[in-house]
């Protein structure tokens, strides 16, 4: 029997756990961890995402601060806001929704965020810490995928994991985490030859491509665990619908466990953002005490 991995239910559980720890943190330090979310422009998909974060922050007992900037904001104005948030002691985590409009630089903003407040884990300092195995703020999506995998599989050691995609946001950090869990990791991308054959070798297949129904049933080994990171909006019978990178219906009978879209990796990403905000607040407090 194939297991449908319920990301929504697991996210509920994680946020509940964060809420308990946040309550203890508040009690002990009289500080409420704060998450600042910056949204440039009014892309409807991003607005949904920001709304979900606000809702989850409330459940977790975190302070959520939203900054909405117009689509034509200058780089200097955005830099100035990030600088203010870096210096604001009530803000423990900063997330600038990406991608930014074309006239702004994603990389410049990522590097402007103080590493201690980098709850996305996208700063080069965070990325470096992750690959070198030091305590780090780990990107939320790969972190959520690992929590699901650990639940599904008692020992990941020696498993062959194939990650489709090599972005700094998903594919690369995902590969680092799988390697740390003693998997044998293969990363495939747009220049890979024989991608189907490589995917078919996978005990664990993680798809982070951004192409609807990219992974076909005959690419999946019987009994593999399939994690679908993709979130693609498509029109079906004139209606907007979210689909992953994996042909879920067709692959379901071949997998031992599989994540749906929606209700899989997406909710786990937000739950991990809550967890990272608490972790960042704890790190910042420990550093302040050490100074
Ligand atoms: N569930 C969640 O919480 C989140 C979901 N997402 C979703 O995950 C997906 C991936 O996101 P992200 O990593 O940011 O996307 P990117 O576009 O940055 O990266 C996509 C990767 O897929 C590879 N790729 C593209 N086409 C092919 C192909 N034909 N064959 C093999 N590989 C290919 C690219 O290869 P190359 O490097 O060679 O170009 C690239 O490495 C998207 O659908 C996004 O919406 C993203 C973040 C969070
Ligand atoms: N700085 C930054 N950090 C990010 O982590 C980041 C980002 N920018 N830009 C966009 C992507 C995408 N992303 C999603 C997270 C959760 C859902 C999510 O909760 N999805 C729900 C459905 C939501 C809906 O109904 O639209 C689900 O899959 O069930 C979706 C997408 C985070 N990203």
Image (spheres, rainbow, N blue to C red):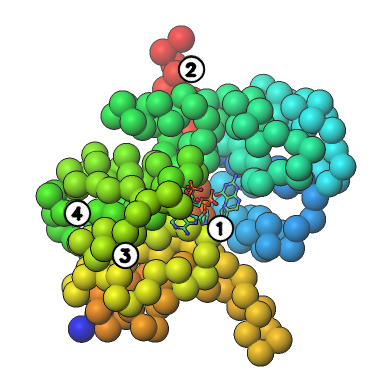
The relative height of residue 126 versus residue 194 in the rendered view (above or below) is above
226 relative position to 26: left or right = left
Q: In the displayed image of the protein, which residue is found farthest to the front?
A: 193
Mark earlier in primary sequence (2, 3): 3
Residue pointed to by mark 2: 288
Mark earlier in primary sequence (1, 2): 1
Mark nearest the camera among 2 and 3 is: 3
Image point 35% across, 63% down: which residue? 227
Under tag 1, what secondary structure?
A: helix
Q: Gap in Å between the C-alphas at discs 1 and 4? A: 34 Å
Under tag 3, what secondary structure?
A: helix
Mark earlier in primary sequence (1, 3): 1
Mark nearest the camera among 2 and 4 is: 4
Mark nearest the camera among 1 and 2 is: 1
The relative height of residue 17 versus residue 90 in the rendered view (above or below) is below
Whether residue 14 is visible: no
On residue 196, the disc is: 3
Mark nearest the camera among 3 and 4 is: 3
Q: Disc 3 beta carbon < 8 A from ligand 1?
A: no
Q: Gap in Å between the C-alphas at discs 2 and 3? A: 51 Å
Mark earlier in primary sequence (2, 4): 4
Residue pointed to by mark 1: 56
Under tag 2, what secondary structure?
A: helix
Q: Position of residue 172 (x, y in %)?
A: 40, 42
Residue pointed to by mark 4: 160
Mark earlier in primary sequence (3, 4): 4
Image point 68% across, 84% down: which residue? 239
């Amino acid at each position: 029997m194939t297991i449908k991995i319920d990301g929504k239910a697991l996210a509920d559980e994680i946020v509940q756990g964060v809420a308990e720890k946040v309550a203890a943190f508040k009690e002990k330090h009289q500080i409420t961890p704060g998450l600042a979310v910056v949204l440039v422009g009014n892309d409807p998909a991003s607005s949904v995402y920001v709304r979900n974060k606000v809702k989850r922050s409330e459940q977790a007992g975190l302070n959520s601060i939203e900054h909405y900037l117009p689509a034509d904001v200058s780089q200097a104005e955005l830099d100035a806001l990030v600088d203010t948030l870096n210096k604001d002691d009530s803000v423990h985590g900063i997330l600038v929704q990406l991608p930014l409009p074309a006239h702004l630089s994603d990389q410049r903003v990522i590097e402007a965020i103080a590493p201690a407040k980098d709850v996305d884990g996208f700063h080069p300092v965070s990325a470096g810490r992750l690959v070198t195995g030091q305590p780090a703020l780990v990107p939320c999506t790969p972190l959520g995928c690992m929590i699901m995998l650990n639940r599904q599989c008692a020992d990941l050691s020696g498993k062959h994991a194939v990650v489709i995609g090599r972005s700094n946001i998903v594919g690369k950090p995902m590969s680092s985490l799988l390697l740390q869990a003693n998997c044998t990791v293969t990363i495939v991308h747009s220049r890979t030859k024989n991608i189907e054959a490589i995917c078919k070798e996978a005990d664990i297949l993680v798809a982070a491509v951004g192409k609807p129904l990219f992974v076909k049933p005959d690419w999946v080994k019987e009994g593999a665990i399939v994690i679908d990171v993709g979130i693609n909006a498509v029109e079906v019978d004139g209606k907007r619908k979210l689909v992953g990178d994996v042909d879920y219906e067709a692959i379901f009978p071949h997998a031992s466990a599989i994540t749906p879209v929606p209700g899989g990796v997406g909710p786990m990403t937000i739950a991990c953002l809550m967890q990272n905000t608490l972790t960042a607040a704890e790190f910042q407090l420990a550093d302040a005490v050490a100074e």
